[in-house]
Amino acid sequence: MKPAVLVTGGTGYIGSHTAVELINSGFDVISADNLHNSEAWINERIGMITGKTPILEIADICDTARVDDLFRKYPAIKAVIHFAAYKAVGESVEKPLEYYRNNILSTINLLEMMKKYGTAHIVFSSSCTVYGQPDVLPVTEESPLKQAASPYGNTKKICEDIIKDSASAYSDINAVSLRYFNPIGAHSSGLIGELPRGVPENLVPFITQTAIGLRDELKVFGNDYDTPDGTCIRDYLHVSDLAIAHVKAVERLLNGRNKASYEVFNLGAGKGVSVMEAIKSFERVSGVKLKYRITGRRHGDIEKIWADPSLANRELGWKTIYTLDDAMKSAWQWEIKLREMR
Ligand code: NAD
Ligand code: WQD
């Protein structure tokens, strides 16, 4: 029997792209999502892309009994990828308890049920947000972690600690935390992509929604930073590249190639890109002149950050394939398809 992977948050943005890559690599996928920030039809789209629709369980991972049921029902589950979380940084400042409850309780529930049912392996969605504004760039896994700038960021730090402590205490649990930099873009089929609810907080969906006419203009949050063009710098990577890293991490755990019971990898392209460069890339690949205006800085923004992904390159045998232009083009194709559906 093929190993099955429980993908929490499997109809979400990164989870859906990862489900595609898992199925393409021969895994069975059991997807569990409460549809808080996604739509069930995404699961059908995964089936259209891969020829195999994942099992979708509408389940809240904070519901301990429900998670227990999932593990009991699917003994083929050999690994968990835990994407399910709330992720809006601004909202987390207004609703910290909801974020702490959802993101932390879901993680504890999974670890407890993994112990109970003897499922040894978990891959966790962490974030470069745990580094805050680094003193030295690029960021390696050894770079110091800073006090989180938001409750959301703090949940990532706390969950990493909970997973690390569990992997250290329980010899039958092995874990990998993947610290994502800035995932963007959509699957090359144009069938799945990011589905922001309401006004997007993130740059690329805001760019594509502005270009399609849903938003009046993009506000560029500050051009007085200490960067070559004054705008903030991030490390953008294509979501399909990011998805493949999850397959590699699961395979590493299942094949016992991990070097410690808890490992951490940075996942980025390793290249800093400014907001203005991102806009130019979008304009280049879409042929659309974007309406934007420089405004004041956004509170809490990091000035510049990009990854040193060499550990993941070496240990996971993974590196990004897609360029910034590829990612922007796919994001734009996805936005156009969404308009056709609206
Ligand atoms: P997303 O919101 O698209 O996907 C998360 C999914 O989890 C959604 O489908 C949502 O319905 C589901 N979910 C949330 N709480 C749940 C619960 N209690 N039970 C069941 N399902 C639940 O977000 P995404 O961008 O795909 O992010 C996936 C993970 O990666 C998150 O943990 C996020 O914090 C992390 N991450 C994302 C980014 C990014 O820029 N997108 C960067 C770094 C880390
Ligand atoms: C990118 C750049 C903005 C919107 C967030 C989370 C972080 C992590 C990744 C999950 C910044 C600028 C944006 C706009 C703009 N997620 N911008 N106008 O800030 O790197 O981080 O996503 O873990 O935790 O905080 O991503 O896409 O919001 O912004 O000028 O309307 O675009 O200032 O420089 P960010 P982002």
Image: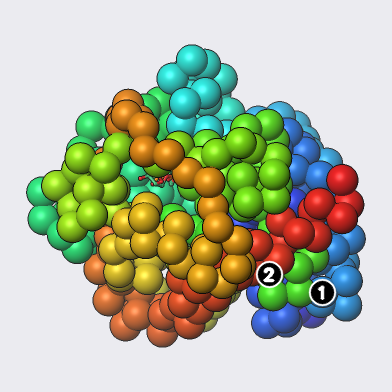
Relative horizontal placement of residue 307, taking residue 153 as reference (left or right): left
Relative horizontal placement of residue 284, taking residue 192 as reference (left or right): left
| Rendered location of residue 211, percent (x, y) | 63, 51
| Rendered location of residue 37, percent (x, y) | 70, 38
Can you tell which mark lies on residue 49?
1
Disc 2 is placed on an element classified as loop
**Residue sticking out furthest to the left:** 135
Whether residue 194 is visible to the viewer of this picture, yes or no, is yes
In which quadrant will I find the C terminus? top right
Q: Is residue 206 above or below residue 258?
A: above
Few, some or many residues within 10 Å of mark 2 (<14, 14–19, 20+): many
Q: In the image, what residue occupies the spot 52% across and 23% down? A: 91
The structure's colour scheme is rainbow
Q: Is mark 1 within 8 Å of ligand 1?
A: no
Few, some or many residues within 10 Å of mark 1 (<14, 14–19, 20+): some
Corner quadrant of residue 234: bottom left
Corner quadrant of residue 244: bottom right
Q: Nearer the viewer, residue 285 or 196?
A: 285
Q: Nearer the viewer, residue 24 or 210?
A: 210
Q: In the image, what residue occupies the spot 61% across and 45% down? A: 210
Q: In the image, what residue occupies the spot 48% across and 15% down? A: 94
Instruction: Identify the residue position indicated by label 2 in the image.
Output: 187
**Mark 2 → mark 1, Cα distance in angstroms:** 9 Å
